[in-house]
Image (cartoon, rainbow, N blue to C red):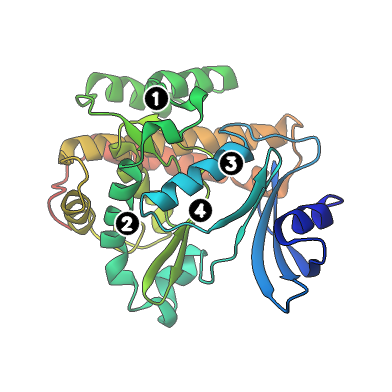
C-alpha cells in the first residue's frame, strides 16, 4: 500500500487524504480496499481500490488497466458498474456502490425481499446490455473466440487428476454441442456473488477480469449453475426462474435463446466450476498457496460431479420454472 497516497493525490489533487482504509476479504492475486478520502474543499469520497498483490498476478484474465477500460465501455453501454475514478497497470480506483454482495443475505434477508422477484429479469436485461458492447472493448488477446471445451479439457489434463465424471461430461458435451451463434462480449463470471444488490435490485456488476469474446449463452448458463443458487431451489441465481431470465433477455435485445442450448451451457458451467475446484485444491496441496479456504474447496469437487451426473441424465423442460 506504499503507493496509496500517490494514487489518491493523482485522482483528487495534492491535498487529498485517506481518512480510513479497510482491506476487504477475498482475492489471492489481487487486493481490494475500501477507502474514505477527504479533499481540501470539504468533499468526502467512498471508494474501492483494487491492487495487484506484490509478486502476484492473476492466473487468468486481463490486467487491471484493461479491466478499467472494459468497465468504462460497459458503463457506456448502459451496464450498471462502479464509476472508474482512476486506473493504472496495477490498480483501479472506483466509486464504492452501497449494497449487498453476499448471496445468502440477498436470498434470505428481509431487506431484499422486494428485490428477489425482480432479479432474474434484471439479470436478463443487464446481460443483454453486456452482449451489446463492442468486441473492440476487449483487450486484444481476449478477442478471438476460443473453443471452451478444448480449453477446459487441456486444463483438466494438465492437472493430472483422474475424474471420470468430468471426462464423461466432456465427451457428452462434445457430442451434443449446440450450433454457435454470433460472438459477443462475455462477462465470464456473471453470477450471484458478483452483483451489488439493493432493496430495488441490481446496482452494479463486479469482477470483469474474465471477460472475453464468446457465445452469449455462456453467461446465461453460468448464472444458472447450481453452485450459485446457494441452497435455493430456484434455478437462476437462487432467486428466479429460467422463463423470467430468458424473456427479459430477449425483450432487451439479446439473441434468441434456444432452451436446449441454454441447458448445454449450464452443464458446461458445472463442469467448468468442478475443474476450477480441482485447480484451487491443487494450489494448496502442491504448495502453490497454502490456504484452508483452498483446501476446503476440494469438498466441492464431488458435489459438482453429482450435479453433472444428474444434468447428463435429465432433460427437464426449461420453458417452465
- Circle 4 sits in a helix, a strand or a loop, which is it? loop
Q: CA distance from mark 3 to mark 1?
A: 23 Å
| Mark 3 or 2, nearer chain start | 2
| Mark 4 or 3, nearer chain start | 4
- Circle 1 sits in a helix, a strand or a loop, which is it? helix
| Residue 120 found in image quarter | bottom left
Q: Quadrant of the C terminus?
A: bottom left
Of tags 1 and 2, the one toward the viewer is 2
Residue under label 1: 148
Of tags 4 and 1, the one toward the viewer is 4
Q: CA distance from mark 1 to mark 2?
A: 23 Å
- Circle 3 sits in a helix, a strand or a loop, which is it? loop
Q: CA distance from mark 3 to mark 2?
A: 29 Å
Q: CA distance from mark 4 to mark 1?
A: 22 Å
Q: Which residue is depicted at the point 69% across and 37% down?
A: 89
Number of numbered discs visible in the structure rendering: 4
| Mark 2 or 4, nearer chain start | 2
Residue under label 4: 206
Residue 8 in the image: state x and y as whole percent.
Answer: 76, 58
In the rendered structure, find residue 123 and report the number of the disc placed on it.
2
Q: Please tell me whether residue 140 is drawn above or below residue 64 in the rendered image.
A: above
Q: CA distance from mark 4 to mark 3?
A: 25 Å
Label 3: few (<14), some (14–19) or many (≥20) C-alpha neighbours in 10 Å: many
- Circle 2 sits in a helix, a strand or a loop, which is it? helix
Of tags 3 and 2, the one toward the viewer is 2
The residue lying toward the viewer, choosing from 7 and 42, is 42
* Residue 190 visible, this orientation: no
Of tags 3 and 1, the one toward the viewer is 1
The residue lying toward the viewer, choosing from 266 and 199, is 199
Residue under label 3: 298
Label 1: few (<14), some (14–19) or many (≥20) C-alpha neighbours in 10 Å: some
Amino acid at each position: 500500500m506504499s503507493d496509496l497516497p500517490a494514487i489518491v493525490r493523482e485522482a483528487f489533487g495534492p491535498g487529498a487524504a485517506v481518512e480510513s482504509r479497510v482491506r476487504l476479504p477475498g482475492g489471492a492475486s489481487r487486493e481490494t480496499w475500501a477507502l474514505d478520502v477527504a479533499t481540501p474543499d470539504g468533499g468526502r469520497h467512498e471508494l474501492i481500490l483494487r491492487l495487484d498483490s506484490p509478486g502476484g498476478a492473476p492466473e487468468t484474465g486481463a490486467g487491471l488497466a484493461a479491466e478499467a477500460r472494459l468497465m468504462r465501455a460497459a458503463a457506456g453501454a448502459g451496464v450498471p458498474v462502479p464509476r472508474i475514478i482512476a486506473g493504472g497497470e496495477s490498480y483501479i480506483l472506483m466509486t464504492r456502490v452501497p449494497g449487498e454482495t453476499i448471496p445468502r443475505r440477498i436470498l434470505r434477508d428481509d431487506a431484499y425481499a422486494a428485490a428477489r422477484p425482480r432479479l432474474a429479469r434484471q439479470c436478463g436485461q443487464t446481460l443483454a446490455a453486456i452482449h451489446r458492447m463492442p468486441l473492440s472493448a476487449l483487450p486484444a488477446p481476449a478477442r478471438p473466440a476460443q473453443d471452451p471445451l478444448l480449453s477446459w479439457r487441456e486444463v483438466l489434463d494438465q492437472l493430472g487428476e483422474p475424474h471420470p465424471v468430468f471426462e464423461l461430461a466432456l465427451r457428452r458435451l462434445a457430442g451434443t454441442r449446440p450450433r454457435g451463434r454470433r460472438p459477443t462480449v462475455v462477462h465470464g463470471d456473471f453470477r450471484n456473488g458478483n452483483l451489488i444488490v439493493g432493496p430495488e435490485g441490481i446496482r452494479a456488476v463486479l469482477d470483469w477480469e474474465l471477460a472475453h469474446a464468446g457465445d452469449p449463452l455462456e453467461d446465461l448458463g453460468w448464472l444458472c449453475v447450481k453452485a450459485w443458487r446457494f441452497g435455493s431451489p430456484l434455478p437462476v441465481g437462487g432467486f428466479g426462474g429460467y422463463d423470467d431470465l430468458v424473456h427479459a433477455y430477449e425483450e432487451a435485445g439479446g439473441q434468441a435463446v434456444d432452451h436446449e442450448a441454454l441447458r448445454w451451457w449450464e452443464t458446461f458451467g458445472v463442469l467448468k466450476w468442478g475443474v476450477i475446484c480441482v485447480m484451487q485444491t491443487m494450489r494448496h496441496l502442491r504448495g502453490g498457496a497454502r490456504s484452508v479456504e483452498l483446501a476446503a474447496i476440494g469438498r466441492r469437487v464431488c458435489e459438482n460431479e453429482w450435479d453433472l451426473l444428474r444434468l447428463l441424465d435429465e432433460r427437464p423442460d426449461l420453458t417452465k420454472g
